[in-house]
Image (cartoon, rainbow, N blue to C red):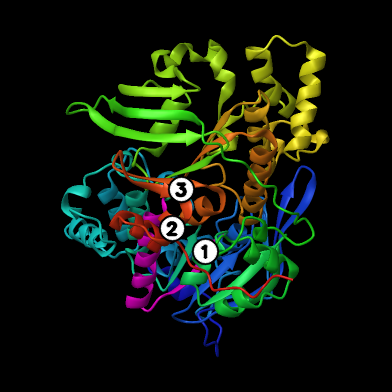
């Protein structure tokens, strides 16, 4: 049955979507929480509208309200919530089930959690097609394969039979796009569709989405905290903060002449070519950059390092005969796409896993001779510390902040509890972590606060080198700016060396003295940071630079 015919239609409306005075509240044990507060906007036909803002700003809740997929405690109130003449606020759940997928589709933030892990991807596309009467048992398979072809998945006939775990993150995101677009909807809502993707895959997915929107004459709402992406792909932008819209306008105008202080903070915090690390900070907290010293003496040298993992059809070589050096006080950037060997290399150097071949000379000692499983007891352990990509996953959920930071001291030193507490307070102050947070658990901290805890825990032993594996990847742009500047200051104050692993060359350029580019386990290019960025020799390096978002140039910050 086609339930759309029962919907309430509003005459005389030309835009695709009209939202007026939308409010979303949640009833919690602590009372009513206002997540979205009196927001209004419209979406034109064929337009890509960006909704930007930091975590907790209300971006995703707004999209869930439009789809009416809030949990049972959520309450939607609006003067108007009109899609193509249809009153969404008063539509029944049965009517909304027909709208979802056929008229309005959504790409969720994490593609792997959006897919059924025990069901082949072809069947998952068929489910959507059959639900909306776009296919039957005789033609569903062919239409599912056509949907895979539309999102440019290689060998779609065979991928039809694949399970999600057999695909990369970028491939899973394409599958999610295929499912969202299978029924040819008129409106696509993309909620952080590039989260967790490397920079070239990110560009490929966004180019794909934009091409499909253009070719099918669709409209789209693109939700992101990455203003660089929004600047390249959106026609207009809405900026949200604490559930409110603080600014909206044409993309170019928002980026070149932001009016609201919050918008200015986000825009200026967005990394771009030609900017300094301090320029990312608001003027009220900006201070003179502390100069660091890079010594000629080598701290760490990697010689002919390789790593093999067992595979179904024989050994898989993740890292292949790589060589590089890190000087004392130097920050070296390690860049490349997902699967290039960056994280494997950092795990080997951190002595979390063993190398298959090669040497790691640290402070004139070959630490590759020490087994990784026993290295935690080695005295050198305190000199090599790691900051992980996801601070939430790296923290024990049962440990308070104080316990997390003090744990390395308890395991690797013999100092007493009074000295331990004093050291915890010292490093907390050093990383800008308020002391009133020391007795909180990880779930009671923000993303930026957890990042500071991870850094504090890593430096509490006064290491000689920090290995930072995408430490800002999951952070909002303004928090990223603060953490990057914190890392700069810590290096200057403590004289540490860094290995900074990232896929974002703009961020790497801001922080690093030297850059190493990896592809398929091999180092294909390395050199001075400015040299690699301005005059890359390899086509692969050029492709990484080309994939980086390029926001419009800004007037000088006041």
Marker disc for residue 273: 1
* Alpha carbon separation for disc pair 2 and 1: 9 Å
Q: Which of 472 and 526 is in front in this view?
A: 526
Check the picture and name the quadrant holding the N terminus: bottom left
* Alpha carbon separation for disc pair 3 and 2: 23 Å
| Secondary structure found at label 2 | helix
The x, y position of residue 453, in whole percent, is: 68, 34
Outermost residue, bottom direction?
A: 12
Residue at (41, 54) in percent of width and height: 532
Of labels 3 and 2, earlier in sequence is 3
* Alpha carbon separation for disc pair 1 and 3: 22 Å
Q: Is residue 217 magenta?
A: yes
Task: Tell me the magenta residue range.
Answer: 198-224
Residue 67 seen in the figure: no
Q: Do the residues labelled 3 and 2 touch (CB within 8 Å)?
A: no
The residue identified by callout 2 is: 533
Q: Nearer the viewer, mark 1 or mark 3?
A: 1
| Secondary structure found at label 1 | loop
Q: Nearer the viewer, residue 159 or 186?
A: 159
Q: Residues within 10 Å of mark 2 (few under 14, many from 20)?
A: some
The residue identified by callout 3 is: 196
Q: Are marks 2 and 1 in contact (CB under 8 Å)?
A: yes
Q: Is residue 463 magenta?
A: no
Q: Main secondary structure of the magenta part?
A: helix
């Amino acid at each position: 049955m086609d339930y759309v015919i029962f919907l309430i239609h509003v005459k005389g409306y030309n835009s695709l979507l009209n939202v007026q005075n939308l409010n979303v509240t949640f009833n919690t044990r602590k009372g009513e929480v206002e997540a979205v507060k009196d927001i209004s906007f419209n979406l034109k036909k064929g337009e890509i509208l960006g909704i930007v803002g930091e975590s907790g700003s209300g971006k995703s809740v707004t999209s869930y309200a439009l789809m009416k997929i809030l949990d049972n405690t959520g309450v939607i109130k609006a003067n108007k919530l009109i899609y193509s003449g249809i009153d969404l606020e008063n539509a029944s759940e049965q009517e909304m089930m027909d709208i979802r997928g056929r008229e309005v589709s959504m790409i969720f933030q994490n593609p792997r959690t959006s897919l059924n892990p025990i069901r082949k991807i072809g069947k998952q596309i068929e489910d959507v097609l059959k639900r909306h009467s776009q296919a039957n048992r005789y033609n569903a398979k062919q239409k599912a394969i056509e949907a895979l072809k539309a999102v440019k998945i290689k060998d779609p006939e065979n991928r039809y039979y694949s399970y999600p775990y057999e695909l990369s993150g970028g491939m899973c995101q394409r599958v999610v796009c295929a499912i969202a677009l299978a029924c040819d909807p008129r409106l696509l809502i993309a909620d952080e569709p590039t989260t967790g993707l490397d920079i070239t895959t990110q560009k490929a997915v966004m180019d794909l989405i934009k091409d499909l929107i253009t070719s099918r004459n669709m409209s789209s709402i693109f939700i992101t905290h990455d203003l660089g992406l929004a600047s390249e792909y959106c026609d207009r932008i809405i900026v949200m903060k604490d559930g409110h819209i603080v600014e909206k306008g044409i993309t170019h105008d928002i980026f070149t002449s932001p009016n609201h202080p919050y918008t200015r903070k986000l825009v200026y915090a967005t990394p771009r070519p030609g900017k300094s690390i301090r320029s990312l900070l608001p003027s009220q907290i900006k201070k003179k950059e502390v100069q660091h010293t890079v010594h000629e003496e080598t701290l760490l040298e990697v010689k002919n390092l390789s790593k093999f993992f067992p595979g179904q059809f024989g050994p898989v070589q993740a890292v292949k005969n790589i060589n590089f050096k890190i000087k004392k006080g130097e920050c070296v950037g390690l860049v490349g796409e997902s699967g290039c060997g960056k994280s494997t290399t950092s795990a080997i150097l951190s002595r979390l896993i063993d190398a298959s071949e090669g040497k790691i000379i640290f402070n004139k000692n070959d630490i590759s001779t020490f087994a990784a499983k026993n290295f935690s007891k080695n005295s050198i352990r305190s000199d090599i510390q790691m900051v992980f990509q996801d601070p939430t996953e790296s923290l024990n959920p049962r440990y308070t902040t104080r316990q997390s930071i003090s744990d390395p001291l308890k395991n690797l030193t013999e100092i007493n509890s009074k000295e331990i507490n004093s050291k915890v307070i010292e490093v907390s102050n050093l990383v800008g972590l308020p002391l009133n947070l020391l007795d909180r658990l990880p779930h009671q901290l923000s993303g930026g606060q957890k990042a500071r805890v991870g850094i504090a825990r890593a430096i509490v032993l006064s290491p000689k080198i920090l290995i930072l594996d995408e430490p800002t990847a999951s952070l909002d742009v303004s928090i990223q700016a603060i953490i990057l500047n914190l890392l700069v200051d810590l290096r200057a104050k403590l004289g540490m060396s860094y290995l900074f692993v990232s896929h974002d060359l703009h961020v790497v350029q801001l922080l690093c003295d030297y850059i190493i580019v990896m592809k398929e386990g091999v180092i294909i290019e390395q050199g001075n940071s400015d040299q690699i960025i301005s005059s890359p020799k390899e086509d692969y390096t050029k492709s990484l630079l080309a994939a980086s978002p390029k926001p419009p140039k800004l007037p000088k910050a006041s």
